[in-house]
Each structure stands twice: as C-alpha cells, then as structure tokens.
Image (cartoon, coloured by chain):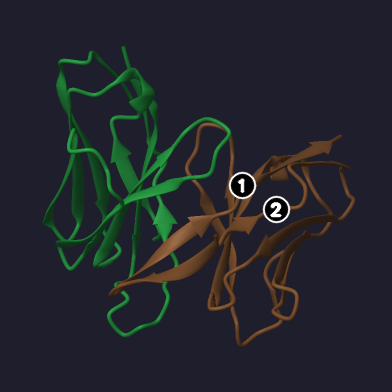
Chain colours: A brown, B green
Amino acid sequence: GESVGLHLPTLSVQEGDNSIINCAYSNSASDYFIWYKQESGKGPQFIIDIRSNMDKRQGQRVTVLLNKTVKHLSLQIAATQPGDSAVYFCAEMISGGSNYKLTFGKGTLLTVNP
Amino acid sequence: DTEVTQTPKHLVMGMTNKKSLKCEQHMGHRAMYWYKQKAKKPPELMFVYSYEKLSINESVPSRFSPECPNSSLLNLHLHALQPEDSALYLCASSQASSSGAKETQYFGPGTRLLVL
C-alpha cells in the first residue's frame, strides 16, 4: 500500500554537527510534505514544508530537500543543538475527498549529545 | 499566533465514565482535526471537520463522538472507552482546503488519556 516511511529510526549526533533525517514516500500523487518536531510530552510542532513544484526550501537552520524522481525527502538541521533533540516526523498530504488527509511517517528520534 | 489549546492536559477515566476533550483555536481556521497517538507511534487521523461539518471519519468506534459547536471549538466526547484507547489525543487546525490548496496543520499539546 501507499506509505510514508523513514530510513533511520534513531539518529545520534554531537552538538554542533549537522543532522540529516531521511524519509521515503511511495505515493507519486503526493505533492505537499511537512516536517514536524515532537518533543516528549508535547504535540507535533511545524518545522518546514515543501510543495512538489520545489526541490529545496530553507528555513532557520533547517533545509528540506525533495527528490521526486526517487520519492525521497530529507530534513537537514545545521549546527544541531541539544534543544533539537526530539522525534521528527515527515508527513504527506493525501487527497481525501474535499479535504486533505495528513499521513505521518514512522518518525526518527534525534538525540544530540553535548 | 499559531496556537491550538487543548484541555485537560491529562485525564484518567474508568470504562463506564463519560468525559469530553476540548480544543480551541483563534486563527480563523475552518478545518479542525482529531488525531490519536500511541506511545512511540506517529499520530493517526480520527476525524476531520471542515466549515463545522464532519467530512472525514476514519472508521472510528462510536464510543468516540466528535462535535464542532462553532468555528473555533472542537470537542471529542468519550463514553465506555476501553483500556486500549489510552493514548495522546491531539487536535489540529488548518485553513480549509476548499480551494484545493493543501494547508499546514497546526497541532495542540494534546490530552494524555488513561482508561482504567
């Protein structure tokens, strides 16, 4: 079936390093993707999004790359800080009638070591 | 302001109890959502409201009953729940997608529910 998944369930990095979190999607009709950060005990927090007419989008310390050819999405975090430790979800927007359903990938736990 | 608020933060209830979860947003969003999230799992969609009308029900058991009294409020009424319903219940809101454009969903902090 169609699904959104992640290559790595856990990622451990040193403070100051760059982090890359990957996500694969299988629905070729998907054209909107969102990265969320979820800290322990909190709801998902919007980080950055990208539409399929773009290959790259940059935010503050974060960059999302979209490769539609291989159906791959990545989130790059520059100069990772301890406060970046969280679970990161990619989410795919799939059409569901007159509304659009958000389907989440499995999530990657990012641990930043001081 | 991208804040979605949810009350209560925590809820413990017995299997015969009736309780309600509440969600509120003042961003002018006309689409609101309920998700269920089990530990170490991604959020799973339960219900979608668009312009105060239920538009998506992901085959959720009838012991969960959503209600959207106005454009800012979303409730989830709970009755005769089972222990396996224990989870984090998340509310989200977004601009409505009547134009066909996909819109970002903003999440609340969730209500952590424990059913005994």
Where is mark 1, residue-wise? Answer: A106
Give the amino acid type for the residue marked by disc 1 in the picture. Lys
Residue B83 image position (x, y, % from top left): 34, 18
Up-down: is A33 above or below B83?
below
- In screen coordinates, is A53 left or right of A55? left
- In screen coordinates, is B80 left or right of A80? left
Label 2: few (<14), some (14–19) or many (≥20) C-alpha neighbours in 10 Å: many
Quarter of the image with the N terminus of chain A in it: bottom right
Residue B19 image position (x, y, % from top left): 17, 26
First reached walking from the N terminus: tag 2 or tag 1: 2
Residue B21 image position (x, y, % from top left): 23, 35
Rendered residue at 70%/53% (across/down)? A6
Which of the 4 image quadrants contains residue A31? Answer: bottom right
| Residue A6 image label | 2
Circle 2: element type: loop
Circle 1: element type: loop
- In screen coordinates, is B87 left or right of A30? left
Q: Chain of mark 2?
A: A
Residue B6 image position (x, y, % from top left): 31, 40
